[in-house]
């Protein structure tokens, strides 16, 4: 699904984008971001390997600021895989919680 020239992974994600754009136009949210990136662990050189492994990252679907000034991180998710649950755990250690839709 493509909206505003942006390709979304699913219709649910595209629909959520439309709803968030309406909230932003109404002034109920600000600073809407698409695909914000969170570093879960920095890159590291593993002993015995020649190249540094890249940082572990989580890419959310959306982030925005609500009327109370809080940053909201939102993910449109159909299935919570074990890897996704691990990433949520690591984000929580950084004080970031994700709202699942």
Image (cartoon, rainbow, N blue to C red):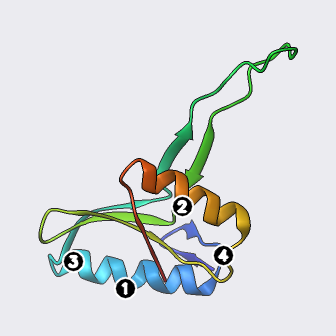
Q: Position of residue 50 (x, y in %)?
A: 85, 13
- The residue tagged 2 is 88
Cα distance between the residues tagged 4 and 2: 10 Å
Q: Is residue 23 above or below residue 44?
A: below
Q: Nearer the viewer, mark 4 or mark 3?
A: 4
Between disc 4 and disc 2, whose residue precedes? 4
Q: Is residue 84 left or right of residue 96?
A: right
Determine contact: label 4, label 3, CB under 8 Å: no
- Classed neighbour count for the residue bearing mark 3: other residues with Cα under 10 Å, few (<14), some (14–19), many (≥20): few
Residue displayed at 63% across by 41% down? 56
Labelled disc at residue 93: none
- The residue tagged 4 is 80
Element marked by disc 2: helix
Q: Is residue 29 left or right of residue 41?
A: left
Between disc 4 and disc 1, whose residue precedes? 1
Q: Is residue 13 above or below residue 82?
A: below
- How many marks overall? 4
Q: Is residue 91 above or below residue 50?
A: below
Element marked by disc 1: helix
Q: Quadrant of residue 89?
A: bottom right
Quarter of the image where the N terminus is located:
bottom right
- The residue tagged 1 is 19
Between disc 4 and disc 3, whose residue precedes? 3
Element marked by disc 3: helix
- The residue tagged 3 is 25
Q: Nearer the viewer, mark 4 or mark 1?
A: 4
Between disc 1 and disc 3, whose residue precedes? 1
């Amino acid at each position: 699904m493509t909206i505003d020239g942006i390709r979304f992974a699913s219709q649910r994600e595209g629909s959520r984008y439309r709803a968030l754009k309406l909230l932003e136009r109404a002034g109920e949210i600000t600073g809407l971001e698409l695909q914000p990136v969170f570093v879960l662990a920095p890159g590291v050189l593993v002993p015995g390997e020649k190249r540094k492994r890249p940082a572990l990252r989580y890419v959310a679907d959306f982030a925005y600021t609500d009327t109370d000034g809080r940053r909201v991180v939102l993910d449109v998710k159909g299935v919570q895989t074990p890897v996704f649950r691990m990433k949520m755990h690591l984000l929580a250690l950084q004080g970031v919680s994700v709202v699942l839709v």
